[in-house]
Image: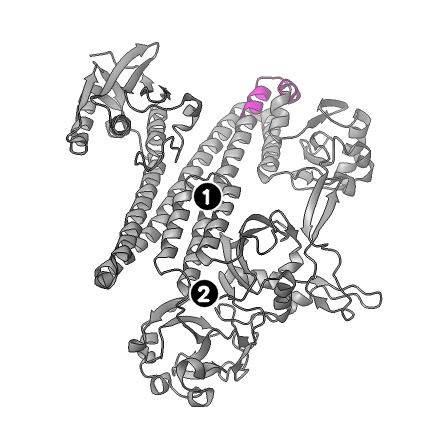
Amino acid sequence: MSVPDTTASAPPDLSACDREPIHIPGAIQPYGAMLVLDPAARTVVQVSANVAEMLGQGPDALLGRPLAESLPQLDPVLAGLVVEPGRHAVLTVSPKVTGLPVHTHLVLHASDGQLVLELEAASERGPATEQPYLLVRDFIEGLHRTASVEGLCALAAREVRRLTGFDRALVYRFDADFHGTVVAEDGNGTLPSYLGLRFPASDIPAQARELYRRNRSRLIADADYVPVPVLPAANPVTGKPVDLSLSVLRAVSPVHLEYMRNMGTWASMSYSIVQDGKLWGLISCHNAAPSRAPFHVRRACEFLATVLALQLSATERAADMEHGMRLRTIGAALLGRMASEERYVDGLLKAPDLLLGMTDSGGAAIISGERVWLVGATPGEEQVRALVEWLPRHPADEAFVTDRLPQVYPPSEAYKDVASGLLAIAVSQIHQDYVLWFRPEVVRTVDWGGDPRKPAGAPKAGRIHPRKSFDVWKETVRLRSLPWRGEEVAGAKALRTAVVDVVLRKAEELAALAEELQRSNKELEAFSYSVSHDLRAPFRHIVGFAELLKDKEGTALSDRGRRYIETIIESAKGAGTLVDNLLSFSQLGRASLRPIPTAMNQLVAEVRRRLEPDLAGRDIRWEVGSLGLVDADPAMLRLALENLLSNAAKYSRGRAPATIAITREDREGEAVFAVRDNGVGFDMSYVHKLFGVFQRLHRMEEFEGTGIGLANVRRIVERHGGRTWAEGATDQGACFYFSLPNRQSQG
């Protein structure tokens, strides 16, 4: 929000912004009104000074009176709202219900034991009520086509700007030090681009970040607004100003309004991206002119930010788990090498690629007794010995980690090109035995949104004021390496434990590592199950309320409106099916395998009977060979065959006749089954995508589906100890193969 003003005589107090009481401003923004109620007596104890504009009664007529007397129609409406701690109860009501002059949005929440009621007149401006849900639908449909954090953020920025019509929407991500970087942006050119710029933590102080975490949406409709005071200033029940942390209308700091004007933005909206209770970043919208987005649009944006947070969390955790599993696999391989050697050092030296790969480092050194072994790009032997002499003076918890070694150990600047980063583990508490990993200096240029070290202008001494310049200020960062990731440090610590345990008991450590890998797989499956399960409820709500709108208000809507509702219902049901399929996919990894001798021809016949209603009227020629018996779980294998046969029928649609062949070939130790069709086929350059979750090679408009079926096939087959692959050519059909261990004779 602000940067310090520096003067020769009085250094500024850098914590002033953090101490500003922005949660108790004593005022609101003028686009709505506020009542504060004592819940016990349901008496009005505070009001905003503009309350007469909405309720037709001024502060004197309302203060101290029970709501049932002053606003008898509104009182029973509020009595029906359930207020949960830390949450808003929201209701849009008509004049007929409340006696208010216009349709009104009511937002109710609890604060310091009081009830805070905010009222906002419904806006007629902006997109039709159903349009935000169509755009949110487009966003949700785009999620499964986007596999990266950058792609998800870009998608969110685009869809939020489409929803709001603001001049610029951006996604702002915090780092570990709460500096923020604009990682995605969508704009119309009216406002300058901030994409890629970095802003110091002081721009959004700690207490402002806490408000963003607790209250996940905020609108400033006009940076030049005149605050409306809350009367009286102190709540007569609590004796202090009302806490507006959760308020929608809360007035913001004058410093922030000046900051907005300096940016050239006269309206802004922010939606918090919160993961596991922590503020990950913001979706921030800016407009060059004052603007108040309609209430239903803001609610849709808030929902979009919630879905984005879930998907970002899933994407990041999946990537972290995948990276961690890769490192654990390398660690397991290193452990095997060490276990097969008399000395653990020999096992490490015979696998230099694994040693460097487990921490993604450029060089390593092993120090044991009086010997030093160097691998890859490292400092010289004497420089390594001097570093090892220095390390015990800086004890660390199992590992010493830094990405700026020259700052903590100045002699290392002499070899910064190979060792600006250091990860070190001590493998003995008696001797100076270490394994060191090195990373080279990475010279980077950081683009800041204005010089974070100095303010513009010459205000009064010591005053904290907002920055005035947002021109790009470039900082060259030297004497630093790429940072060490948590999984890499954990891998190094695990190696330390492994080295110690290899010396003591090699076999037990191998078993423990196998259990750790199995636990990681279960965690990944449990996480996938949890995310899929939690996403089902929002889609059910969308379908339920859309059907309710159709039933209750359908006769009042135009044909186009009814089509919109049908589209919402259809799309939400489709998204729900997608989540159900993902849930099924995660459950496959958790279900117990119960193999028995299974007749494959009988399974194929059962699957064909189940598919017959969907294939009625189709000209399909089935060619089923002698498929024999296999040891398999029939329920799981039936699901795999159903996916393969339904895919063959779907992608051969339009062929007359469509030909689907199922055959078996016995090879050494395995039975190979093939499902072949004469359909549209696929380009073999994309064959690696076929069995991935959400991977599709054809457009949804051409062939329906969720992109999970083949992933289910692969998971089922692999759980049986088999493998899957495919062959095909565009417009020449496809053949999908799966193998199973051959423990049954053909019959």
**Res. 360 mark:** none
Q: Quadrant of residue 643?
A: top left
Secondary element under disc 1, as helix, strand or loop, is: helix
**Res. 86 mark:** 2
64 and 218: which is toward the camera: 218
Q: Position of residue 250 (x, y in %)?
A: 52, 71
Q: Is residue 9 visible?
A: yes
Q: Position of residue 540 (x, y in %)?
A: 30, 52
Going by the numbered disc 2, the residue's amino acid type is: Gly
Q: CA distance from mark 1 to mark 2?
A: 25 Å
Asked if residue 133 lies left or right of residue 404, the reply is left
**Rendered position, 346 above or below 712:** above
Q: Which residue is mark 1?
A: 314
Going by the numbered disc 1, the residue's amino acid type is: Ala
Secondary element under disc 2, as helix, strand or loop, is: loop
Highlighted range, magenta: 332-351
328 and 74: which is toward the camera: 74
Task: Report the label total.
Answer: 2
**Rendered position, 59 above or below 691:** below
**Rendered position, 405 above or below 651:** below
Q: Residue at x 63, y 65 (%)?
A: 261
